[in-house]
Amino acid sequence: MHEPSAGVVAPADPATADVVGNTSVTNAVYGSSVLRPWHKESQPERGLNARGVRMRRSSVLLAVVLCVCGPLLALAAPSAVSPQEIKATFATGKPFTSKSPSGTVFILILKSDGTALRTPKGVTAGTSGTWHLSATGYCSKWGANSENCFTLQKNGPEYLVLDAKGKIAAHWSAPS
C-alpha cells in the first residue's frame, strides 16, 4: 500500500479504500477537491483554467508565427537606396559581388572617377565600362553596349538592382 506524504491524512477506514492511490475510492473518501500529492492524476494544472490554457496556446502560436514570418516580413519590405548611398557604398574602388538572375557571378569595381570594371568570377580579363549617378540611382555602360540605368533597394544584407521596368537585374553584396 502507498503511504501518503507527510501532512496528508490517509483514509480513516482502510476497508473503504482498497488502494490509497485508487482515484475513485480516494475521491469518495477525500472528495474531488482535495489534492492527493502521492497520485499523479491529482497534480494541479499549475493554476491554468480553460482560458489560461487557450491563452498559453495562443501565445505559443504567436511566437511561432513571428519566428517564421518575421524574417519574411523583413524581406518583403526592401528599402530604396539613394544615389548618394550608392556612391558611398559602392564607388569606393573596392571589388564587390554581383549575381545576375541567371546565376552568373561578376566581380564589379566602381571607381569614384566614373570608371568601372566587370569581371566574371573565375576569369582574369574583364570588361571596362563607365558609370554615373542618376536622379534615382545610377547608370552604367559596358564596352560597346548602350547605357542602362538602375535603382537599388536594400533587402537585408544584399542589394537588389532594378532595371527601368522594376525587374531585378542583379543582386549585389556590399564591398568588404
Image (cartoon, helix red, strand yellow):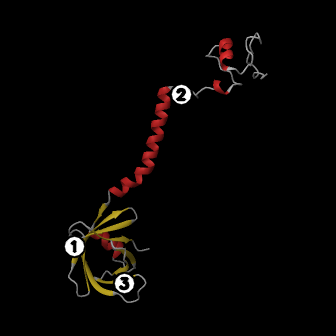
Element carrying mark 3: strand
How far apart are labels 2 and 3 at the CA level? 64 Å
| Type of amino acid under label 3 | Thr
Q: Locate residue 176, reporting x and y percent.
A: 44, 74
Element carrying mark 1: loop
Report the front residue among 14 and 141: 14
Element carrying mark 2: loop
**Mark 1 / mark 2, whichever is N-terminal:** 2
Residue found 40% across the figure and 79% down from its top? 95
Closer to viewer: mark 1 or mark 3: 3
Residue found 28% across the figure and 85% down from its top? 129
Residue found 67% across the figure and 27% down from its top? 40
Above or below, comparing residue 171 to residue 35 in the picture: below
Q: Locate residue 51, reporting x and y percent.
A: 47, 27
For the N terminus, the quadrant is top right
Q: Locate residue 102, reporting x and y percent.
A: 34, 73
Residue underneath mark 3: 119
